[in-house]
Image (spheres, coloured by chain):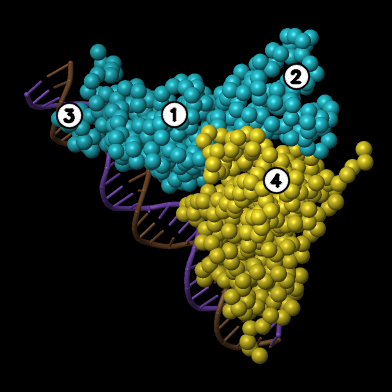
Chain colours: A cyan, B yellow, C brown, D purple
Amino acid sequence: MSHPQLNERSLQLLKALIERYISDGQPVGSRVLAKDSDLKLSPATIRNVMADLEDMGLIHSPHTSAGRIPTVSGYRLFVDSLLTVKPLELQEIARLQGGLARIEDRGQTLEAASRLLSELSQMAGVVTLPKREMLYLRHIEFLPLSHSRVLVIFVTNEQEVHNKIILTSRLFSPAELQQAANYLNSVYSGRSLAAVRDAVLKELQDDREQMNQLMLDAIRMAQLAFEPEEKKEDFVLSGETNLMGFSELSDRDRLRSLFEAFSQKQGVIHLLDQCMKADGVQIFIGEESGYEAFDHCSLVTSSYSVSDEVVGVLGVIGPTRMAYEKIIPYVDITAKLLSAALNPKSASPS
Amino acid sequence: MSHPQLNERSLQLLKALIERYISDGQPVGSRVLAKDSDLKLSPATIRNVMADLEDMGLIHSPHTSAGRIPTVSGYRLFVDSLLTVKPLELQEIARLQGGLARIEDRGQTLEAASRLLSELSQMAGVVTLPKREMLYLRHIEFLPLSHSRVLVIFVTNEQEVHNKIILTSRLFSPAELQQAANYLNSVYSGRSLAAVRDAVLKELQDDREQMNQLMLDAIRMAQLAFEPEEKKEDFVLSGETNLMGFSELSDRDRLRSLFEAFSQKQGVIHLLDQCMKADGVQIFIGEESGYEAFDHCSLVTSSYSVSDEVVGVLGVIGPTRMAYEKIIPYVDITAKLLSAALNPKSASPS
DNA sequence: AGTTGGCACTCACATTCCGAGAGTGCTAAT
DNA sequence: ATTAGCACTCTCGGAATGTGAGTGCCAACT
């Protein structure tokens, strides 16, 4: 067979080439690769193999007389089958844990996680806010504003406060609002917001007969309060400026469209949402993400959870040429630490 | 006198030169200036004047055979004494007003103002969050969390909800917390947070005798809730990416340090705080701001107010070479519109 | 058949070298 | 005081050139 094929040796060379390129940033030529890899082969042989790899679309050369650099498929094969990740040392983990645990405010915890990611990776770190739906309701409160506007305040998961202004059909007295809140608290407290919403809808459809006016009002307000809001989704980004240092992104237009994507938020959120389904570490390389602004970036993500429910995603954004073997464990451990920090503390015997 | 002096003519030429440079971005030579200005002077004469202006440090040439560009002092003189701002057309104002008025959520209003600034100017817009101190308290509420942690929720100015977790000295029952909140609401509602804090401190010092335990507890909690937090200050930034288009900022390191300043926030906040004292439009040109990252930027700001109290600052950030005569009225009007949008609506006869 | 040395060839990149153009400062004339 | 004239300086763009890295292919070797 003169057809290109992926034998053990070519894979080994591909691996060596990509590792070299990741650490150097320079196209890798046959000569350096010959010295770099353990294989005892001459540059000429390596050239043959490299030609095969190029035919298979795993590497390419930017111009005739330069070495080769990995393509997206090359990176993909690399991270899927060739990569050897180094697990972190326990000592290191303990150190990181210290930075995340025991922060009172939730927003600050997320920010700390994001900053942690960016500092570890020297690239950009991102953490989505927890999906509202997945949080469980702890307490709800209504506060009358002017006219028939009512401020709804609800607390979830011990710490987080959300608020929203709703327009009610008629004017309610403070006492009425208080009663409505009491009712809702007694019935729905402890359930997830998604569950509450479903239950509320069902109540409204099913049996209006046996409900008194108070309950009906309360339910109606709850419906308004918990109707889904697309706009509210958000993420915390840190270390964006680190990305300006990388030559592959320092092109004016690329950098600009990347930062524009960051401030539009919407596209990034959509991309991150996709990562919530899969568990474990997930990777998008270059164009794989489908967002033009991310064409020259890779995204390494992992989801995090509260009470065993996946509620959000965090990750690292950097140039496709990144040290995946380090970034992957970083993202992995940060996701676990963040989950631990957000979870209701286990009962601690004093 | 052969000494350089600032007569009417040289000022007129300086003005023409700066206007030309702002619109073109190219160093301005004697020839173009001769044609540009209304003065009937030969290039040679202009050259003499320009040499004088250079001696006075108002302009300088980047190299021997280029035209002149304004220095910081040149710009300063320009904006202080030479600038002719065009007031906006009423029609234009009405259009802008539409975008800002009638947004329910306060956070969104600030964001809208920031975006408005960046869109009008095609540069970056910034709006500080209102100073907490200046807001008046509308309602306060305590919610027990685990152990002796208490979630304090307080509403200010009709719409804004703040919250904070405090650690109390002992465990309080929900009923006790309710009573404390009732007490505080009855006594302090309607006053500014700063006033509340002062009053609370005074209460604690003055006459412990005639207070019952309940009031004392309430006061203590209020003290914890309202103690000043430096960290909470923040601003809303939009259109940062517009800045990447300007050649004078496209230098990698400059751009990076600028964006780093944006994400550090602290320095920017400090700078903006200084603008709160002066009223009317205020301008920092280049190094005047004292922050290295802003060396090549100008900042045009104005303060905005709620209930006739200055509570925050907004402005535009761009390269020193900006169309001040347009930006100044933009910033001015946006500040006024934002103040109007935030103020308690005047009673509207339906 | 796979591997290797040799060799001609191709490019990107840095360096150098003009030439053109813009703009200045100075001086002498008005 | 203003201006025309002139020599001079300096940047910028393009062309020419050399260098070095790296390739592809072929023929020879194992």
Q: Which mark is residue A215?
A: 2
Is there one chain holding both mark 2 and mark 4? no
**In this orientation, does residue A253 appear?**
no
Locate the N terminus of chain B by quadrant. bottom right
Of circles 2 and 1, the one toward us is 1
| Residue A90, percent from left and from top | 29, 35
Corner quadrant of residue B310: bottom right
Q: CA distance from mark 2 to mark 3?
A: 77 Å
Is there one chain holding both mark 2 and mark 1? yes
Labels 3 and 4 touching (C-beta < 8 A): no
Closer to the N terminus: mark 2 or mark 1?
2
Q: What residue is shown with label 3?
A: A39
The residue lying at 65 percent from left, 78 percent from top is B49
Residue type marked 3: Leu
Relative depth, front residue between A228 and B249: A228
In-image side of B221 versus A110 (left or right): right
Corner quadrant of residue B301: bottom right
Q: What residue is shown with label 1?
A: A347
Give the SS element for disc 2: helix
Residue type marked 1: Ala
